[in-house]
Amino acid sequence: MTNKGEPVVENKISMNGLITKSIGGIYYVEAPNGLYSCKARGVFRKRGTTPLVGDRVEIDVTDEFEGVITKVHERKNELVRPPLANLDQLILVVSTCEPIPNLLILDKLIAIAEHKGIEPIIVITKIDLDEHEPLQDIYSSAGFDVYISDNIKGDNVDGITALLEGKISGFAGNTGVGKSSLLNAIDGTLSIETGEISKKLGRGRHTTRHAELYKLDNGGYIADTPGFSALETGRYDIILKDDLEHCFREFAPYLGQCKFRDCAHIKAKSCAIQDAVEKGEIEKTRYESYVLMYGEAQQIKEWEL
Ligand SMILES: Nc1nc2c(ncn2[C@@H]2O[C@H](COP(=O)(O)OP(=O)(O)OP(=O)(O)O)[C@@H](O)[C@H]2O)c(=O)[nH]1
Ligand SMILES: [Mg+2]
Ligand SMILES: [Zn+2]
């Protein structure tokens, strides 16, 4: 006889797995013997933690290929937007045109990755439509690895594929830049849905509706996530204003050299960062993004944290 109130557990099977997809409250967990569609136990909702794609979890099997997530293992890192956990690197996709590059969004994503200790890598797409050199110069001189891709022809993707081996990589960027197309170019068997650019708006249609991890032959996992439009650069991951200078890697050699120790590098006298921008040692567009992000960070009220 069991005690009153204690759940009866018959032949409970528990196993570990990886969340590869999350859609409408159902989590798809890849376990050693197959894919389980799972619900999350109520306690997660009460605690306000939601399992994320990329989470390593423990599940109780409830039926054939169905289960309940009972535990989320400790995360190495997590992003709010795109909603992913345990990333080894973040591939930031930007197109030469259609949509025109939004460097503020790109620099925000880079800063967030830096802040979380996730390596940012830049991929410039649609190199068949416009010149990629200006963008490539900005980001290589800032100290990033930059790859280029014509996703339609599929040229140049071998280098990117090699980069993904054995790692979990997120792909992020504005809507319509060609994230899903790039993934299809990397692995032709994926057949991910892509969207036509709306000529009128010059931007995509949000073709990707949920985050999903795909497994590659080389053992890597790649996460396709929905992009966002230029209008919704909302506050996803907060970087405090004092942390921001550390999220622009090309600033590093100059930090500590300003006249004032607490220099914000904005309209201050004898500022090493602004001098470097003047001399062309730091790219203007990168610095402009810093200034805009600093201004936004100043608006953050303490109670919002
Ligand atoms: N010419 C050209 N077109 C491309 C390239 N990459 C993508 N496209 C086109 O751009 C459009 C948008 O591509 P998607 O792959 O759906 O873009 P996405 O970044 O996944 O967009 P969301 O899912 O909305 O975030 C599609 O019509 C693609 O065919 C490229 O390298 N060259
Ligand atoms: Mg997509
Ligand atoms: Zn300064």
Image (tube, helix red, strand yellow):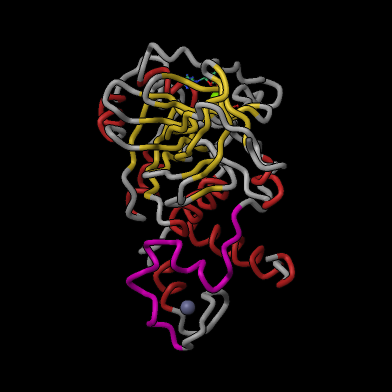
The answer to whether residue 141 is left or right of residue 56 is left
Identify the residue at image location x=51%, y=54%. Answer: 112
Q: Quadrant of residue 7?
A: top right
Q: Quadrant of residue 214?
A: top left
Name the quarter where the N terminus is drawn.
top right
**Image position, residue 160 (x, y; %):** 31, 31
Q: Is residue 252 above or below residue 238?
A: below
Residues in magenta? 237-259
Could one spot residue 172 in this view of the protein? Answer: yes
Pick the residue in front: 43 or 77. Answer: 43
Identify the residue at image location x=59%, y=44%. Answer: 81
Q: Is residue 304 above or below residue 182?
A: below
**Image position, residue 19 (x, y; %):** 49, 32
Name the quarter where the C terminus is drawn.
bottom right
The answer to whether residue 216 is left or right of residue 61 is left
Identify the residue at image location x=57%, y=47%. Answer: 105
Could one spot residue 96 in this view of the protein? Answer: no
**Image position, residue 295 (x, y; %):** 65, 66
**Image position, residue 293 (x, y; %):** 60, 61
The answer to whether residue 192 is left or right of residue 164 is right
